[in-house]
Amino acid sequence: MRRHSFARTVQTPTTKTRRLSDTGGFTDLGPHARQVEAIFDRLAQAPAATLSILVEAHRLVGPFSPGVVQRFAERLAIAPEELFALCEAHRLLAGRRQPCRLGICANGPCAARGGNEVERVFAEKMMRFEPLRCQGACDLGPIVCLDHGAPLAISPARARSLARADPGEWEELLAVEKPVHAFKTEPRVAFEHLFAKGAHQLATARRLGLWKSVEKALALPPASWLDEIEQSGLVGGEQDGEPVIDKLRAVARGEGPRVLVVDALDLEPGSTRQRVLLERDPQRVLAGALLAAHAAGIEEAFVCVRSEYEVVRERVEQAIAEARRAGLFTLPETGLSPLRVHLRGFSSLAFCLNPRRLVEALEGRPPRPLSELSPLHRRGLFGRPTAVIDAETLACLPAIAERGAAWYRGLGEGTDGGAAAPLKIVTLGGDVKRPGNYEISRAHSLRHLVETLGGGLLQGKSLVALQIGGASGPYLRPEALDATLTDASLSRFGARLGSGAVIAISDKSCLFDLCRREARFFIREACRACDGCARQMEELGQGVDRLGQGLVAVEDLLAIDRELQKRACPLARNVARPLRSVLADFPEAFAAHRGRECACFPRRRKA
């Protein structure tokens, strides 16, 4: 590989990795050069850390130029074209758009809570802003970021104040970042210790008996503990809802070192359940990871969190260090060889909702066609048998270890779907009085969630629709309020709970505008590994805009969607799902948008 003059490298005999010399280095990165060098020093030799290095560096210096990618490739001993493709897939490269001080989350959940009105205020006042990707704080929405910093709550009234103020005063006018909301309900499993003071600390976890329950399960042979998990009926909290026992048994049968990937990324807009768990009780998730490792003979675990979750990263890192120092990661079947646990920061792109895409990113590889990827339990991370399990599911294992499978199954009595996943963390968003995370029984109805727990809609607003499962879910009419949260009940309306996001849409939002935003989101977040899929998704995005203007027929758009339905990619299959539900079940909303009579357009004043 040809080396540029600025990138003089040396090869150390011990590590066999390239290191930029003092004369080359990252000096052109300005004041962040030393910090970037420290990131490489800390992580360059760590397993599965390439993307984490890039993401951390990106948060410091912003989008990468081709020259910076070349320098990073030299340091990591990776072919520049491969690293460039990885950076491009994860949106880390510099674009043509000029940086902007104000950014607004442009996705459906924030727009449904007033983000559309904030955008209108900024546009009317001729304030420049840029649309942002999901910031993972949907229940605090609408969200604005100042100078690409932490997500801050904003309202239309505060947006008008910003328009009148000097830019130097913006920071004082915006609300400070608030923790993600979570509310007490009974009974609790994953949230059992969430509200205890200092629950994120090892001393508190031990005082509350968390690690005692882990010791109880570790005393069982792995086969017996696997049987206990199977009898509990625990299923994954992610989109597929696959029984956890299927993943663990498949990995346990695999050959060679086995791996656990903890998915705590909250990549579905509208859901913040993983964030609240790891922010407040990372000890419980780590305990669950150890229990899963014991069941399947797993030797190494990677906890994947979003890079913008700074508090989460700090607390998980602290929790891992405390547990490691206390010797809590030692498994009975491995003797003195403890479970190796690593924290990895990720870019928050929706294509990693697919577990195989998540593992591919963890490997530091650019996306390839799904047909080229093997099943994870056979050839997962670096060819090793791999289980991908979300943080919510792992957080249930300590309670099962303490009280037994029969107790957990008993919590599911009264649900149409049986005992599988009797409780679920639901993120309630939209125009309700108490948005946030609730761990509730699936036997409860949507009405109980929205009106009793959520306090109903904000004053002066009425419910027109519910979106179930997050930004990729369909919109349901208010008649669905009496459905329970079980998939058996929701399936009668063509929905399933999936990621656990439920968004209440009021008459102050335009349903067509929301589904257009969601289509744009998934098109923007697609991996683009397959040319045909990427092209059809772009056509669909352009078609949605033209449909709203009356420039294309509905049938033409649905024809593109039918082609996308044939794709292997779940992102492609779901990109138009909200739009399909609006066109089929809310024709009046579509007609109102076409007639410029919806919330997207200011009301006409009477003469």
Image (tube, rainbow, N blue to C red):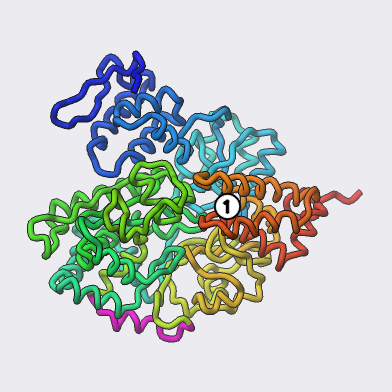
Count every numbered label the image shows and give the total: 1
Is residue 198 among what the camera can see? no
Q: Is residue 360 magenta?
A: no
Relative to residue 393, is residue 129 depicted above or below? above
Q: Is residue 413 magenta?
A: yes
Please tell me which residue is depicted at 61% across the width and 74% down the height of the picture. Answer: 493
Secondary structure at badge 1 equals: helix
On the picture, is 331 further left or further right than 33? left
Is residue 351 among what the camera can see? yes
On the picture, is 389 further left or further right than 165? left
The picture places residue 289, in percent across and down from the top left corner, at: 26, 61
Image quarter of residue 395: bottom left
Q: Which residue is mark 1?
A: 110
Label 1 is placed on what type of residue? Cys
**Disc 1: CA contacts within 10 A as few (<14), some (14-19) or many (>=20):** many
The picture places residue 281, in percent across and down from the top left corner, at: 31, 59
Please tell me which residue is depicted at 61% across the width and 64% down the height of the picture. Answer: 474
Relative to residue 313, is residue 329 depicted above or below? below
Magenta residue span: 402-416
Viewer-closest of 216 and 167:
216
Viewer-closest of 466 and 498:
498
Please tell me which residue is depicted at 20% across the width and 49% down the height of the picture. Answer: 321
